[in-house]
Amino acid sequence: DNFGLRATVLVASFGGTACAWFHWFATIQRSFLVYFIGQLFGASVFALITNVNGLLSNQWFGANGRDIAVTVASLAGPIGNMLGAVIPSLVVKQHDNGRIVGMGALLLMEAL
């Protein structure tokens, strides 16, 4: 184990947080480039986030709990995607004049 579980989780957390803050900042600047830089952070740590489940369950849980730990950790992604599809419709609204409001608040909630 050259890199370590803690370092992997910290790098993935930093990358995800940087992605969220870049997305929020892009709404203020109205800059696609800033948003794209945030996407690069998110995409670069995606493999760390999705592949840490097995290593985490092997190090933290005994033989009896590993299957449940991997199942719960693997379901966190799809459940997060489901919430990510529902919550924006509750926060972001479009007025009759076509103006969209709430996107900055949504991305700020993601960053926090």
Image (cartoon, rainbow, N blue to C red):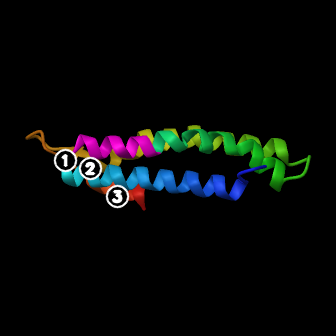
Amino acid tagged 2: Ala
Report the residue at 69% width, 45% height from top. 52
Q: Earlier in the sequence, mark 3 or mark 2?
A: 2
Horizontal arrangement in the rendering, residue 10 relative to residue 88 (left or right): right
Q: Rounded to the nearest whole Å, what is the CA distance between mark 3 and mark 1?
A: 15 Å
Horizontal arrangement in the rendering, residue 63 relative to residue 86 (left or right): right
Task: From the top left corner, tell me how far across and down residue 97 is, in percent.
Answer: 8, 41
Packing grade of label 1 (10 A; few <14, some 14-19, many >=20) is few
Packing grade of label 3 (10 A; few <14, some 14-19, many >=20) is some
Task: From the top left corner, tell me how far across and down residue 33 is, in percent.
Answer: 27, 42
Main SS class of the magenta portion in the image: helix
Q: Rounded to the nearest whole Å, what is the CA distance between mark 1 and mark 2?
A: 5 Å
What residue occupies the far bottom of the structure in this picture?
112
What residue occupies the far right of the structure in this picture?
63
Mark 3 falls on what kind of element?
A: helix
Mark 1 falls on what kind of element?
A: loop
Amino acid tagged 3: Leu
**Figure check: 9 above or below 79:** below
Task: From the top left corner, tell me how far across and down residue 35 is, in percent.
Answer: 31, 44
Amino acid tagged 1: Arg
Disc 3 marks which residue?
A: 108
**Figure check: 85 above or below 17:** above
Q: Which of marks 3 and 1 is nearer the N terminus?
A: 1
Q: Which of 19 and 79 is in front in this view?
A: 19
**Which stretch appears magenta?**
30-41
Disc 1 marks which residue?
A: 30
Report the residue at 46% width, 44% height from top. 42
The part of the image, by quadrant, that contains residue 60 is: bottom right
What residue occupies the far front of the structure in this picture?
2
Q: Which mark is residue 103?
A: none
Q: Residue 26 carries which label?
A: 2
Horizontal arrangement in the rendering, residue 56 relative to residue 7 (left or right): right
